[in-house]
Each structure stands twice: as structure tokens, then as C-alpha cells.
Image (cartoon, rainbow, N blue to C red):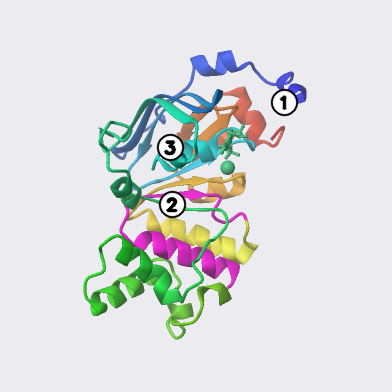
Amino acid sequence: MSSTARTIPSLASVASRQQAEPSDPVAPTKIEAESLDFFYGTTRALEGITLRIRTNVVTAFIGPSGCGKSTFLRTMNRMNDIIPGTRVTGGLRIDGHDIYAPGVDVVALRRRIGMVFQKSNPFPKSIFENIAYGLHVNGMAGSKADVAARVEESLRQAALWDEVKDRLQTSALALSGGQQQRLCIARALAIRPEVLLMDEPASALDPIATQRIEELIYDLKKTYTIVIVTHSMQQAARVSDYTAFFWLGRLVEYDRTDQIFTAPTEKLTEDYVTGRFG
Ligand SMILES: Nc1ncnc2c1ncn2[C@@H]1O[C@H](COP(=O)(O)OP(=O)(O)O)[C@@H](O)[C@H]1O
Ligand SMILES: [Mg+2]
């Protein structure tokens, strides 16, 4: 930190110009953070985050490792709640409702705000069961035929159906890494979330599997609001409509992706997207 800090603008100058709104907001707001701070014990990992995430677009979070991207993503479905000693202040609204208000049903919230992780984590069960399980635990199972139909629909949405339709009863663990990640996406989609949070979903995959995931993200945004954390700027440029650049727990700049990559407002953003640090 000390070596880069000397060559880049101070955080104070960045914070005063922080943008909560992309320059040409089109879609309605889905998620809105307002002066959000996040603490692990006494350590502040996010500071004064204010931004609006738009409906049915892909928003990418970029920034160097440790700058709070995953932490912020996890505040959106209260996944941080399970980490002892954490604390959130400020506002976080989804569809206008404060998700940290007393009495919020966190299980229902996580059903609406699905999540896919960097490391695919299929259950040691059949491909079919991996998806059917979530339907059962969420009380969405219905008849056997309903479950089968939902499994097929989810696998089709995740662009995996054609590859697995003849082996649904075989172990999910026998799938390739890229297939396992698409299975995890199918599993998340099966319970029909409104938002899909993806934390570096392709960073453990080879280029071909990565391309499949990126194509999938592009298709899914017709139906879902997607937020993706990526350390690949090429990936952010390819898949996202809006990009938010984080640095040391602050939101430095948030704008249309083409704007961020071709004509950012902040020197710090420019230095990062041109590979001068990070
Ligand atoms: N479970 C945790 N407990 C304590 N500190 C954490 C935890 N997870 C992340 N942090 C800290 O919070 C900061 C932001 O981390 P993170 O959100 O994982 O960043 P990113 O996803 O941008 O790499 C880092 O300083 C990290 O060390
Ligand atoms: Mg992370």
C-alpha cells in the first residue's frame, strides 16, 4: 500500500467526488446503498458507499484485492451476518425496502438474492438432486413432475441441459469445473431469485469455460439483475453494462462500463484500468 499510495491521488479528493449514479441511468433502481459502512470487529472494510444498482443489467465490481468487493456483495443478501463481530451502518434498500430493518426475514431475502461463489460447490449428490434439494428445503417442490420440470428449466437457463440430460442421476462431482459452476448457477436459478450475486464466478475456470459463463451472464440479464465481482478487467468490459471501481473500502467511480474503461473521471480509476497498479 505505501508504495502505490505515493503515486496516486489521496482518498479525500476521491471521496468528495464519489458518484452514486451512472451518468445516464436508464433502468429503474433495484438495489440502493446509502452511506454504507461495514466493520469486521473494529476494522472498517467499507466506508460511505453510496450507489444505485439498476434492474436487469450487469454491474461489475472491480478493484484490487482486499478493497471490499466481496464484503459489499455479501451485504446485499446479509451473508455477512453469519460472520461474528460484524456490523453494518447506513442504508441498504432493495426495491425500496431496508433489508437491515428489524423483522426482515433473512431466509426469504436470500431466496430473492441468490449467490454464486468463486469456487463451485456442488453437493456430493446427483446432478438432479443438486437442484431438487434447494426446491425441497425452500418448500417449492410440489409434485414429482413439477420438480423434474423445474430442474430441466434451470439447467436450460444455465446452458447445461444438453450436456447433462442423459446423466442426471450421476454424481455432480464428476462434472468438469466449468460444468460444476454452471450447475451451481442452475441451482441458484431454480429458486427463482430476482438478483444473482456472483463473486469471481469464472476465476477458477479455463478460457473456454469462462467464455461459456460470460455468454450465460449476458443471456441471464434479460431476466435477472446481476452483480459480478471480477478481478479481470477484460471480463468486466465484456459482460457488464455498469462498472463500480473500489479502492481501500471506498467507491471511487461508478459509471457506464464503456465510460469507465475509455474515459474515466478519476485519475485513480484510469491508473487502475490501464494496469498502472493493482
Ligand atoms: N471474514 C473476515 N474477517 C475479517 N476481515 C475480513 C473478512 N473478510 C474480509 N476481511 C477484510 O476486509 C477487507 C475487504 O476484503 P474483501 O471484501 O474480501 O475484499 P475483495 O473481495 O475486494 O478482495 C480486507 O481487508 C479483508 O482482509
Ligand atoms: Mg473478494
Residue drawn at point x = 49 percent, y = 67 percent: 123
Q: Which residue is mark 3?
A: 75
Residue drawn at point x = 40 percent, y = 40 percent: 78
Q: Amino acid at mark 3?
A: Thr
Q: Residue 126 in the image: state x and y as whole percent.
A: 46, 77
Q: Residues within 10 Å of mark 2 (few under 14, many from 20)?
A: many
Dividing the picture into quadrants, the one containing residue 36 is top left
Q: Quadrant of the C terminus?
A: top right
Q: Residue 208 in the image: state x and y as whole percent.
A: 61, 66
Relative vertical location of residue 237 with respect to residue 45 in this rendering, above or below: below
Q: Amino acid at mark 1?
A: Met
Is residue 185 found left or right of 69 in the rendered image? left
Q: Which residue is mark 2?
A: 115
Dividing the picture into quadrants, the one containing residue 241 is top left
Q: Which residue is mark 1?
A: 1
> Where ligand 1 lies, by quadrant?
top right
